[in-house]
Image: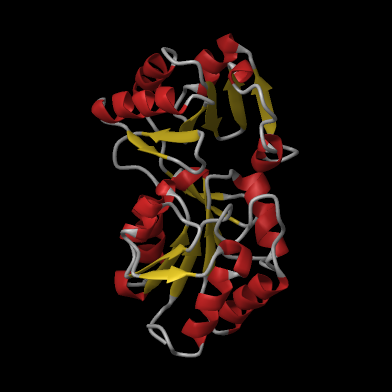
Amino acid sequence: MSIRLIVSDVDGTILPRGGALSERTRAAVQACAQAGIPFVICSGRWYVSARVIAEGLGQADGYMIVANGGAVVRMDGGIVREWLTPTAEARRAYGIMRKYNVMMNAFVRNAVYRVNTGALKRKKRGLDGYLGDVYRIVTDDWEAFESEGLVNPYKLEAYGEDPDALARLKAELLEAGFSVSSAYMDNMEIMAAGLGKGTAVEWLARRLGVRREECMAFGDNTNDRSMLEAVGWPVAVANAAEELKSCARLIAPDCAEDGVAQVIERALRGEIG
């Protein structure tokens, strides 16, 4: 088998929305370990909640890529490599975001700062669980957001309920030169130009001595695009955004049907790669 590294998004890719990790997915990840193939979570989540997924997969060592490619960390949370958005760039993005009625998140090393939460009137779909129950979350403290949250963040996020406003915000951020992608329909992830999951995957592959054509990546939304473009075996699950499917080499079955596990099983049997 020529595939020597597998990276995967979490939510909507190996974890169904509102669901749980399946036994089939756990078994596939453990089979990778037995074959000596690292399986690496690559998520918009930060360490605390990403670790819950890794532990659910039975992983005790290795690496995770978190904060949308903002950092590579070990399973114990130790930071191996970081990619930060410079403070000046974060403040410039914030200036654009403030024009719109969106909830804003800023991910920094030890906390998430969240302001304008009233922009999301419906339930925030378990965002606290997504961040991690023991993670420090500072809510609707504008002074702290501006003085601490915008200092070299891993990423900024915007959440809103008006699709047209989100589209205008995205266009303005792109025009200003930022890296902009989405993990959900009402979500936007903002980083400095050139940053994202793909940058982290490329770096980790080099660290592990794995060539591009020996890497496989799985995703479901546009924040996974740079990751898929960074590997020789880009795979989108069937429930993925059409934009992501357009850059995939393979389309896996739906996340709810253990699509990632099914493709890994085929790869381990030598049917792929």
Residue at the image point whose x is 50% and y is 39% from the top = 185
The spot of residue 229 in percent (x, y) is 31, 59
Residue at the image point whose x is 41% and y is 60% from the top = 204
Check the picture and name the quadrant holding the N terminus.
Answer: bottom left
| 200 sits left or right of 14 in the view | left
The spot of residue 238 in percent (x, y) is 48, 63
Q: Residue 123 sits in which quadrant?
A: top right
| 202 sits left or right of 55 in the view | left
Check the picture and name the quadrant holding the C terminus.
Answer: bottom left
Choose between 99 and 107: the one closer to the eye. Answer: 99
| 98 sits left or right of 231 in the view | right
Choose between 5 and 102: the one closer to the eye. Answer: 102
Residue at the image point whose x is 40% and y is 58% from the top = 201
Residue at the image point whose x is 54% and y is 69% from the top = 260
The spot of residue 50 in percent (x, y) is 63, 51
The spot of residue 66 in percent (x, y) is 53, 48
Choose between 37 and 173: the one closer to the eye. Answer: 173
| 97 sits left or right of 78 in the view | left
Q: Residue 27 sits in which quadrant?
A: bottom right
